[in-house]
Amino acid sequence: MRKGILSIGAAAAALTLGLTACGGESGDTSAESSGAPSAAAGDAKPGKIGVILPDSKSSARWETADRKYLQEAFDAAGVQSDIQNAQGDKTAFQTIADQMITNGATVLMIVNLDSGTGKAVLDKAKSQGVATIDYDRLTLGGSASYYVSFDNTAVGKLQGEGLVKCLTDKKADKPIIAELNGSPTDNNATLFKQGYDGVLQPKYDSGDYKKGPDQSVPDWDNTQAGTIFEQMLTQEPKIAGVLAANDGLGNAAISVLKKQKLNGKVPVTGQDATVQGLQNILAGDQCMTVYKAIKKEADAAAQLAVSLAKGEQPQASGTVKDTEGNRDVPSVLLEPQAIFFDNVKDVVADGFVSKDELCTGDFADKCTEAGIS
Ligand code: BGC
C-alpha cells in the first residue's frame, strides 16, 4: 500500500472517528484550514444536501450505483436530499446547482464535467455560504471543502499491471499496445494514465512492448470511442493489447475487435466492474476490470455531507494536492481492486452486482465456471 493512502477499512474508520463536531477548537485541522462554511450551525434541523451527477452514458455507475448508495445513506441519516444528473450538459449543471441552492441546499456535492465549469459552480455555492464536496473527480483550481474518491493513480496502475498479466498469460511477443484514455477534461483520466503509463512506459523503453496509438476519448463518449478504436485498428492492424480506461471504452474496443474476430485474442482492460464489463470478462473478451467499492465512496461522502448539513466541521482522513490551485484539499481516498475471471465472484459477494443480473442466458455456465453461486 502506498504511503499516505488509506485502505478502505482504515479510511472508513478514520472518517468515523473524525466526524465529531470540532467547531470552536483552535487546532490546525485540515477541515478548519479548508474554510468549510458552517451550513446550519446552531440549528436543530439539518440543511438539505444537493448532489449533481455528471451523465448516464460515460459509465453505468452514476445511475446504477452512486445514486442508489448516496440516496440510501441520506435516507438512513434522515437528511433531506436532492440527487440530479446533468446528462453531460454543462449549462444544465449550473442551472441545477442554482436551483438546488434556491430550494434550500446548504451542502452541494458535485461530480464535475470539467474543472472550469465545476469551479464556477463551487465558487458560486461557496459565496452563498453553501458547503461543497468534490465527489469522485477533483475540480482543479476549485474551492470544494472536501474531496472523496479512490486512489486514481492506483486504479491506473492496476490496469497497467492487469494488461501485463494478460499479455504474459497469452505469451505475447513484443505486443503493440493501443491506449484508449478517458476524457481529457477529467482529472481522474489524467491520474489513470499516469498510473498505467508508469507500468507500460518501461516496457516500451525496454522494447518488450511497442507503443501503438494513444488517444483520449472526449467526455468518455463510448460511441466516439468505437470510432476512434476503429481508426486505430485500421492504421495498426497488429494491435495486440488495449488499455481502455473504463468498461464502456473497453466494450467499444471489443465491439470493433469482434468484427475482425480478434475478440478474446487481444486483451482489453476496463474499470467500474459494470455488468457489461464483468460479462465481457466471463466471455473471455475482456482481460480485467477495476472494482471500486462505490458503496464505500458514497457512504464516506454522505457522512461528510450529513455532518456539514448539521453545521459541523468534519475532519477528513487526509489531503490531496490540487496542483492548479496549489491547495491541500481535505480528502478521503479509497483503495481499488483488480478483477479477473477468477475473482469476478468477489464483486458479487460484495453485493455490487447480483448473480441474477450477471448470470443471464449464456453467462449462467460461465458464472458456474467462475465459482459464482
Ligand atoms: C470515474 C470512472 C468513470 C468515468 C466515466 C471517472 O471520473 O472515476 O469511474 O468510469 O469517470 O464516467
Image: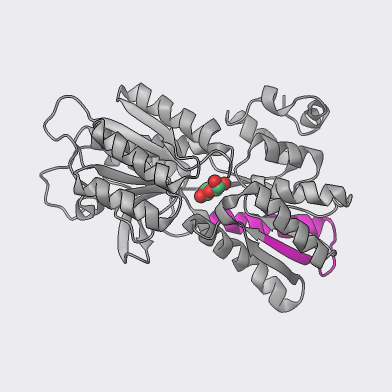
Name the main secondary structure of what is drawn in magenta: helix
> Is residue 248 in view from this perspective?
yes
Image-quadrant location for residue 240: bottom right
Q: Can the viewer see residue 144?
A: no
Residue 178 magenta-drawn?
yes
The region drawn magenta spans 154-179
Residue 76 position within the rendered picture, expressed as x and y whole percent measured from the top left: 36, 22
Residue 365's spot in the image, x, y percent? 83, 28
Residue at 61% over, 49% down:
221
Which percent across, then down, holds residue 345? Answer: 68, 33
The image quarter containing residue 33 is bottom left
Frontmost residue, 20 versus 180: 180
Q: How is the image coloured?
A: one colour
Compared with 178, 62 (above or below) is above
Q: Is residue 22 left or right of residue 355?
A: left
* Residue ID at (17%, 34%): 40
Residue 348, above or below 257: above
Residue at the image position 33 percent from the left and 57 percent from the top: 142
Q: Which quarter shows the C terminus? A: top right
Say which quarter of the image contains residue 245.
bottom right
How far across and down, in percent of the image, does residue 65 sit? 52, 33
